[in-house]
Image: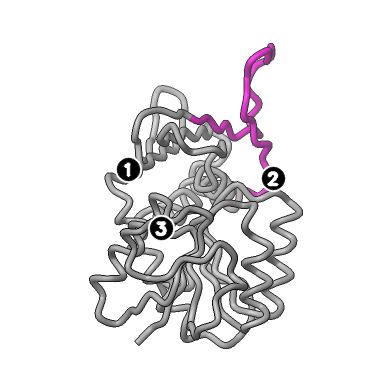
Amino acid sequence: MLKMIISGCCGYMGRAVADLAKADSDIEIQAGIDIVKDSLLTFPVYEEPSQFRGEADVVVDFSHPSALKPLLDFCMTNSLPVVLCTTGYTDAQLALIRAAANRIPVFKTANLSVGINILFEFVKRAAFLLGDEFDIEILEKHHNRKIDAPSGTALMLADAAKDGKNYSPDYVYDRSGYRKPRAKTEIGISALRGGTIPGEHSVFFAGNDEVIEFRHSVYSREVFAGGALRAAKFMANLKEPGMYDMSDVLQ
């Protein structure tokens, strides 16, 4: 039986993870961490990770970047693997994550969908094969409550395209006031926010008289919740500190 803690358990994604976990006979939710209380939850909820005194095998985090440090401190103190699914970290917070990975297993990804992680490989391969004859543009769409832009997934797609090149492209996020032709070394990244869009990412390879488009759409949060549980089961069996992502889970 996998004993799990959900950080951010009262948010939209935290609830989705909890619902799927309850339906999984191999998982037991030990506790939740959230500043919000929800009387409908069937497990105890604490405001701070350090308030938990029980036993656990793994922590799944869908909270907020501001909650990172106490969560990492708790996991390192208790030698717990952590699955970080929150996005929008600062450079300083990313440094904290890398430092924690020297002591505990740390899983980090901007997108838990199996499909999008396969798309990363397609984009990398296409960037290599198409070369400089095709301009690369990325468009991401999300609901109106998402606070970071561009999305972490859009940046991962840009990084995948960069890995397919033999040089380091420049990421361009805003072309307002941009009064010169598009450079071949650019990768444009645009963001749309509105309604309840769970997530959609498109990568365009635009050449002379032809356009190749890779698109991935998500229609429910359960896609990400399922990926989080898959990652949690993988991480719970790890003892070796280090950074892990979906490519490790999918092997």
User: Label 1's element?
Assistant: strand
Q: Nearer the viewer, residue 42 or 59?
A: 42
Q: Name which quarter of the figure residue 155 lies in.
A: top right
- The answer to whether 160 is drawn above or below residue 30 in the figure is above
**Sequence-first disc among 3 and 1:** 3
> Tag 1: residue type?
Ser
Question: Residue under circle 2?
Answer: 168
For the residues marked 3 and 1, what is the alpha-carbon distance in whole angstroms?
21 Å
- The answer to whether 164 is drawn above or below residue 103 in the figure is above
User: Label 2's element?
Assistant: loop
- The answer to whether 201 is drawn above or below residue 111 in the figure is above
Q: Name which quarter of the figure residue 141 lies in.
A: top left
For the residues marked 2 and 3, what is the alpha-carbon distance in whole angstroms?
36 Å
Q: Which mark is residue 14?
A: 3
Q: Is residue 188 magenta?
A: yes
> Tag 2: residue type?
Ser
Residue 117 visible somewhere in the drawing: no
